[in-house]
Amino acid sequence: MKNQLIILGLSIGLLACGSDDGPSAIDCSGEVCQATIASGETAVTVPSEIHGTFEMEYTYAENNSPIDLGTKATFAIAANSLIVSVDGEECYTIENAVERTSGSGNYIFKAECKADYAFNISQNTDGSLSEINLVPANGPGFYGQFTLVQ
């Protein structure tokens, strides 16, 4: 009987820990974009201070934005990958972060396999996540901004 209780307890514990509604490297089976490094860009590694999973909302959108204002998304940031889960779409992973301006503290993941846009991750002065801007993948410009859901 004691062994059965131990097995039951372990089984319940495993089931309770096995579910996470946010995306992670384990549960996103969508497309993987291997971004290319263009002229004027440098390969970078995202600092550990902003690694994690973040619930965000598109709180600013230009008229030409490919994403609608108010769209919710979850981003899982790691050293060299970004998992993107926009409400109503299949999640996908972008690999190979780049920096366009040396020392800017911004880390760009180009979603070229999805569309001509990229996610520009920026940090606050204390090192925490500030916002994720949506920008053209292959040049200057600005479509809008994701901010943390409060």
Image (cartoon, rainbow, N blue to C red):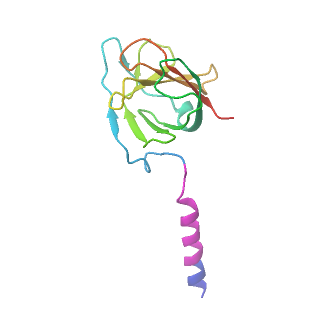
Image quarter (top left, top right, bottom left or bottom right) of the C terminus: top right
Q: Which corner quadrant of the image does residue 13 belong to? A: bottom right
Residue that lies at the very extreme toward the front in this rendered image: 63
Residue that lies at the very extreme toward the right in this rendered image: 150
- The image shows residue 41 at horizontal and vertical percentages of 36, 15
* x 36%, y 32%: residue: 114
Note whether 80 is above or below 3 in the view shown. Answer: above
Magenta span: chief secondary structure: helix
Quick check: 48 left or right of 34? Answer: right
Q: Which corner quadrant of the image does residue 139 belong to? A: top left
Image quarter (top left, top right, bottom left or bottom right) of the N terminus: bottom right
Count of numbered circles in the view:
0
Residue 5, magenta (yes or no): no
Q: Which corner quadrant of the image does residue 99 belong to? A: top left
Note whether 40 is above or below 97 in the view shown. Answer: above
Quick check: 40 left or right of 107? Answer: left
* x 34%, y 41%: residue: 31
Note whether 113 is above or below 22 in the view shown. Answer: above
Note whether 48 is above or below 30 in the view shown. Answer: above
- The image shows residue 112 at horizontal and vertical percentages of 34, 27
- The image shows residue 79 at horizontal and vertical percentages of 44, 33
Q: From the viewer's side, name the closer residue of 144 and 40.
A: 144
* x 47%, y 18%: residue: 64
- The image shows residue 75 at horizontal and vertical percentages of 51, 37
Q: Which residues are magenta?
A: 7-21
